[in-house]
Amino acid sequence: MLGFDIIATVPEIFDGFRTASLLGKAVEKNIIALRVHDLRDFATDKHHMIDDRPYGGGPGMVLKPEPLFLAIEAVRRPDIPSRLVVTAPRGKRFTQARAGEIAAWNESSPETQLILVCGRYEGIDERVMEHFRPEEISIGDYVINGGEVACMVIVEAVARLVRGFMGNEESALDESFTRDKLEYPHYTRPAEFRGHAVPDVLVSGHHAEIEIWRRNRSGAARK
Ligand code: SAM
């Protein structure tokens, strides 16, 4: 089982995420585990401070090293293979291939752990990176308020590739970015809606022709 351990400054962002839809079902069925840890619980002073002003001056605040060190050390399980990810705009761009690589790594052991650290404010004290040498992952070339949403992206993309998550494992093989392709267009009933008809070939029942149509309508994945 793949256990996601998320260290967050705003843990309540995950409230619905953890329990809803396919992810919630996968948690219920023990296909994955999803634990959210409040960074503030690891603060070392009486005011539960997790951030402080940056050395050298400048705007904004920086997440302090002490709570992050304590949180990572408390959460990390030494008895199973574990990986540590820090979300950061400067990190390596997250891709379907990376999601697949993490899901495949999970297969190497009956139990694995992916620890995800959510940054906030100006970011994280660099000594966390110096000490733990995490994988730094970016979800794209833009800046969002905190790592929580970035973690959700990573969790969803990886979890749905974990065996048993989707029920039908073939859906994952056919999806966009899996074979350097973007998936073909989909239609469902009714066959005609407000003057827009479903392509004839899809209602023909001719599987070989449907396959050819789908192949032709699949685009090349963006590089
Ligand atoms: N000062 C940082 C910079 O310019 O690179 C941006 C900090 S951002 C406001 C706060 C946190 O959100 C980051 O530490 C990171 O955890 C998360 N974050 C923002 N954009 C992200 C992205 N594109 N990918 C992954 N995480 C991101």
Image (tube, rainbow, N blue to C red):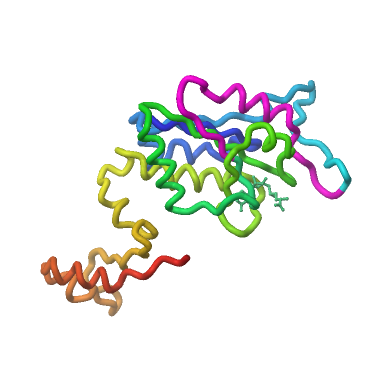
Verify whether residue 4 appears in magenta: no
- 183 and 179: which is toward the camera: 179
Task: Tell me what residue is drawn at x 19 percent, y 67 percent.
Answer: 211
Position of residue 172 relative to residue 63, above or below, is below
Position of residue 80 relative to residue 16, above or below, is above
Residue 195 is left or right of residue 141, and the answer is left
- 138 and 122: which is toward the camera: 138
Residue 143 is left or right of residue 56, and the answer is left
- The percent position of residue 202, horizontal first and vertical second, equals 19, 70
Quadrant placement of the N terminus: top left
- The percent position of residue 158, horizontal first and vertical second, equals 43, 44
- The percent position of residue 133, horizontal first and vertical second, equals 62, 36
Task: Tell me what residue is drawn at x 57 percent, y 39 percent.
Answer: 85
Q: Quadrant of residue 41?
A: top right
Verify whether residue 77 appears in magenta: yes
- The percent position of residue 79, horizontal first and vertical second, equals 47, 20
* Magenta highlight range: 58-85
